Image (cartoon, rainbow, N blue to C red):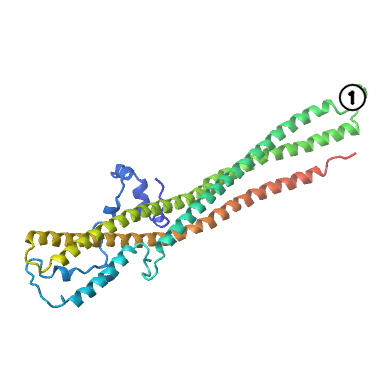
Amino acid sequence: MQLKHPVLCKENLVVMFLTVPNDFTNWKKFANIELTDEFEGVRVHIPSRFKINVNHLLRGLRDNESDDSTGSSPAGGNNMAARNDSVINNITQIWNESPVNHKSVDFVDNFDHLNTSLTRMADLWSKFAFLAERIERRELAVASDHQKAGAFLENFANVNTNVFGMDNIIENRSRKTTEESQNLNIINTILKQAIGFFGNTKKVKEEEMTSVCLDVIENFKKFQDYMASLHFLMERITNYRNESEKRIHILLNKLTRANERLSHIKGKSDIKGSEIDRLVTITTQTSDQLNNLISRIILVKLTFVNEYALYQKTKYIISEVFQDWFRERLKFGDVQQEAVQRLFTDLQDLPLK
């Protein structure tokens, strides 16, 4: 298992847990923590702008409570209703609200824009990484052509003595080595240096390719993995946002209807106590469910912001991968350049007409 977290991947305890065989092997394969369980037991302070106040409706309706008229005047009730309308509007806008500045309501737009840009960036990087690897493999194929060229040149040097030299047609009775024969021997001797150069070119490129594949190409893929991890996190949050928004509307409608009914029947003597108890139960339970949902949304947004802050570190992989790539190209390029220079120097000794 390869750990892709930009911080935890460097923690020895985490790496050991994920790599050393242990009793949790099967758990690691099948573990899939649901979002409802991920924040189980975690509590956050809910800002007052998200708290619907129903005390003025429940006053005197719950056990051990008397109907105190204090704060229950029509004007007070109207003010509380107006405040609750503002709270409901805040709740419906909870996803738009920035987790660091609640007055800014562009979080969803920024989130969607980030997701679009991430998708585009991942696509471009994937294509570039593919071409980078193909460049290396094509250069290896060219180096293989060098080796083939060296083999052809070696055979050429073996055959050319059967073509050059007059003694191939007219027997040289004196057996003296002519200047032309000497020059042919010099040419073939220096051609052997070229043959060695062509063969060594493939060897050098194979060494470079091995080094590049082990480090550079792996880092190309590592950066892809980080982008994929962020993409899946954002996809998960988007799905949860859609589900939670529907749930918010359901709970708000349920709570609003119960409150309207309570407000309508409160003070009437001909209403059954069981009906009041049912409405009180609906109001309190729905309020609790709504508060739990709001808490989870706040936690999800804060968690994403923290994860996104960690993700910023991954940009340094770009620096690392390009430095490593061209360091290898320079190192092996210098080796190849030195070989070219030596061959060029040897070629200056070739006899000319």
Task: Work out whether 82 lies above or below 168.
Answer: below
Query: To which quarter of the image does residue 8 belong?
Result: bottom left
Residue 134 visible in the current orientation: yes
Tell me the residue that label 1 is attached to. 167
Locate residue 314, reporting x and y percent. Answer: 47, 57
Locate residue 209, reporting x and y percent. Answer: 58, 43
**Left or right, 155 with reference to 63:** right
Q: Quadrant of the N terminus?
A: top left
Residue 211 visible in the current orientation: no
- The three-letter amino acid code for the residue at tag 1 is Asp
Residue at 12%, 59% in the rendered image = 278
**Left or right, 54 with reference to 190:** left
Considering depth in this image, is 158 or 310 the residue closer to the camera?
A: 310
Query: To which quarter of the image does residue 103 belong?
Result: bottom left
The number of discs equals 1
Residue at 38%, 70% in the rendered image = 101
Q: Quadrant of the C terminus?
A: top right
Locate residue 230, reporting x and y percent. Answer: 42, 54
Locate residue 337, reporting x and y percent. Answer: 70, 48
Q: Could you say whether the residue bearing mark 1 is in a helix, strand or loop?
A: helix
**Left or right, 221 with reference to 247:** right
Residue at 16%, 68% in the rendered image = 57
Task: Work out whether 57 lies above or below 193.
Answer: below
Considering depth in this image, is 120 or 167 the residue closer to the camera?
A: 120
Alpha-carbon neighbours of circle 1 within 10 Å: few (<14), some, or many (≥20)?
few
Task: Work out whether 162 lies above or below 8.
Answer: above
**Left or right, 344 with reference to 77:** right
